[in-house]
Image (spheres, grey):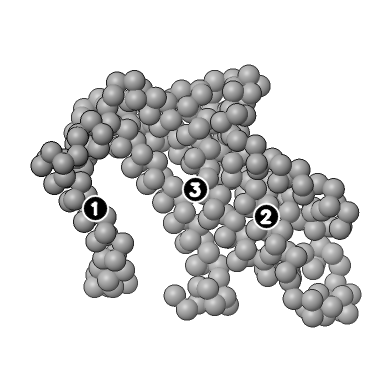
Amino acid sequence: MSIAAWVKRLLPPVTPLVVVFAAMEVAVRMGWVKEFLVPTPTSVFHALFTDGAGSREMWEALLRTAEGSFAGFALSAVLGLIVAVVLTSAGWVQRAFYPYAVFFQTVPIIAIAPLLVIWLGFDLRTVVASAFIVSVFPVIANTLAGLLSVDPALRDLFRLYGAGRVATLFKLKLPSALPSILTGLRIAAGLAVIGAIVGEFITGGGLGGLIGVARREQRVDKVFAILLLSALLGVVMFSLINLAGRLSLRHWHASESAS
């Protein structure tokens, strides 16, 4: 892709961000907004890049949060896919167990996090479990919807030619459900970051632990910097799923072949 094409692609999303940052800078410096409520973008970038040990601490915390987020997301992707396949194996299995998956999703993670600490301890396992709990349901729900929406004519064709259940699953159902699976993974990628940070609120460490420290120190600039890093982590994970979707769907599915 040429430089001009990259500029054309990046200009629309970057322009509103620059405008918002400029408006924040002017509003705070002119005294229209108090700096202890909303910091200037320059102070946020100072906290991120030029604050010495504080900046290093934030980037190291980002790596710890990324580790928990990616691990929890990977676990939700694998187990969510397996659970969805099992749920489609028989109607009674779906009726018996899918409501529990829904219930699992509706319980607030902030209420479960203290129990995770009791069961797993104050370490990475709790953060991974928290990220997994928050992100697994979209994978199950979207994969299940994709598997159940396979063209009935194609199912009948596979049955006519004597294809077994395993062959039908891997050669028809999973390829047909791939766009829905990727949609679930996109949602789960962002939720995994949220779940990891919630887990870190309880265990300490990572970006979640730093938010608590910055709040006690009343460092609003540091809080905004940490929020920016967490958003960046979510965007990176989302972009990786988008890249996987483009590589796997661009030759045959309209959602990617037209882009």
Relative to residue 65, is residue 121 drawn left or right?
A: right
Viewer-nearest residue: 53 or 35: 35
Foreground tag (1 vs 2): 1
Q: Which residue is mark 1?
A: 20
Question: In the figure, residue 10 lies in which quadrant?
Answer: bottom left
Q: Residues within 10 Å of mark 1 (few under 14, many from 20)?
A: few
**Where residue 190 is drawn, which disc sits there?**
3
Eyeballing the image, is 2 above or below 102? below
Q: Are marks 1 and 3 in contact (CB under 8 Å)?
A: no
Q: Position of residue 54 (x, y in %)?
A: 26, 26
Q: Position of residue 122 (x, y in %)?
A: 54, 20
Kind of residue sitting beneath label 1: Val
What is the distance, in whole Å, between disc 1 and disc 2 at their CAs? Answer: 36 Å
Mark found first going from the N terminus, 2 or 3: 2
Looking at the image, which residue is at 62% across and 25% down? 116
Kind of residue sitting beneath label 2: Ala
Q: Are marks 1 and 2 in contact (CB under 8 Å)?
A: no
Q: Residue furthest front?
A: 32
Eyeballing the image, is 119 above or below 26? above
Eyeballing the image, is 223 above or below 152? above
Kind of residue sitting beneath label 3: Gly
What is the distance, in whole Å, between disc 2 and disc 3 at their CAs? Answer: 16 Å
Task: Check disc 3 and report its element: helix, strand or loop.
Answer: helix
Q: Residues within 10 Å of mark 2 (few under 14, many from 20)?
A: many
Foreground tag (1 vs 3): 1
**Where residue 87 is drawn, which disc sits there?**
none
Task: Check disc 2 and report its element: helix, strand or loop.
Answer: helix
Residue 17: tell me if it is visible. Answer: yes
Viewer-nearest residue: 103 or 68: 103
Q: Position of residue 5 (x, y in %)?
A: 28, 73
Q: Which residue is mark 2?
A: 141
Disc count in the image?
A: 3
